[in-house]
Image (cartoon, rainbow, N blue to C red):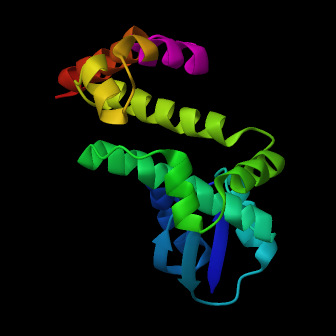
Amino acid sequence: MKLLIKGMVCDRCIYVLTEEFPKLGLAVVDIRLGEVVVKGPAVDEPLIKAMLQKNGFDLLYSKEEKIVERIKTVVESGIQRRVDTGEAQKFSTLISKELHRDYDSLSALFSTVEGATLEKFIIAQKIEKVKEFLVYTDQSLSDIAYALGYSSPAYLSNQLKKYSGFTSSYYKQIRRDKLAVMKDFL
């Protein structure tokens, strides 16, 4: 059974659902962002839906919702590609190319379905990646800004503060606290 899932935007989402479906007696055959293929005994849709919602996901139903989930997947993979390869590509071009549609119409659809602009979503996803780098790596803000294609560390710093409410120092302190706890534990 193939399920299209709303809210899957990162590897942690894949991990969570890989752990959760077996609890319903369903084996995960294939899983990728926005999509899970499971097999096993018949399970009521309300039970699957309840498990998904408990974990911050939902089933996709409308064609528009499916397109928006594909857009989100493209954004996440575009950010990761930028980090992995340093390849700079405009999201408008990437999204349009991947979905074989005009960017303006996709952006308008995204705003209608999500209630927020696609540009804000892209920024939010990049900020999540920045927070991840600050907490889980020792990279400097300059390195992170370069990796994610920001024009300057100052611009990234301002955007981080604007969208998260916290400075890079706050997230670096979380990293130091985690390392201190680990050091004490070992």
Quadrant assignment, res 135? top left
Query: 168 or 136, which lies in front?
Result: 168
Residue range in magenta is 156-168
**Can residue 40 be spotted in the picture?**
yes
Q: Residue at x 71, y 82 (%)?
A: 43
Q: What's the magenta bit mostly, secondary-structure-wise?
A: helix
Left or right, 40 with reference to 87: right
Q: Is residue 158 magenta?
A: yes
Left or right, 115 with reference to 17: right
Q: Quadrant of the N terminus?
A: bottom right
Q: Residue at x 73, y 50 (%)?
A: 110
Q: Residue at x 32, y 21 (%)?
A: 175
Q: Position of residue 140 (x, y in %)?
A: 25, 19
Q: Position of residue 131 (x, y in %)?
A: 42, 27
Query: 151 or 15, which lies in front?
Result: 151
Q: Residue at x 43, y 19 (%)?
A: 156
Q: Is residue 151 above or below residue 120?
A: above
Q: Position of residue 5 (x, y in %)?
A: 65, 65
Q: Is residue 163 magenta?
A: yes
Q: Position of residue 93 (x, y in %)?
A: 51, 53
Quadrant assignment, res 6? bottom right
Left or right, 25 with reference to 44: left
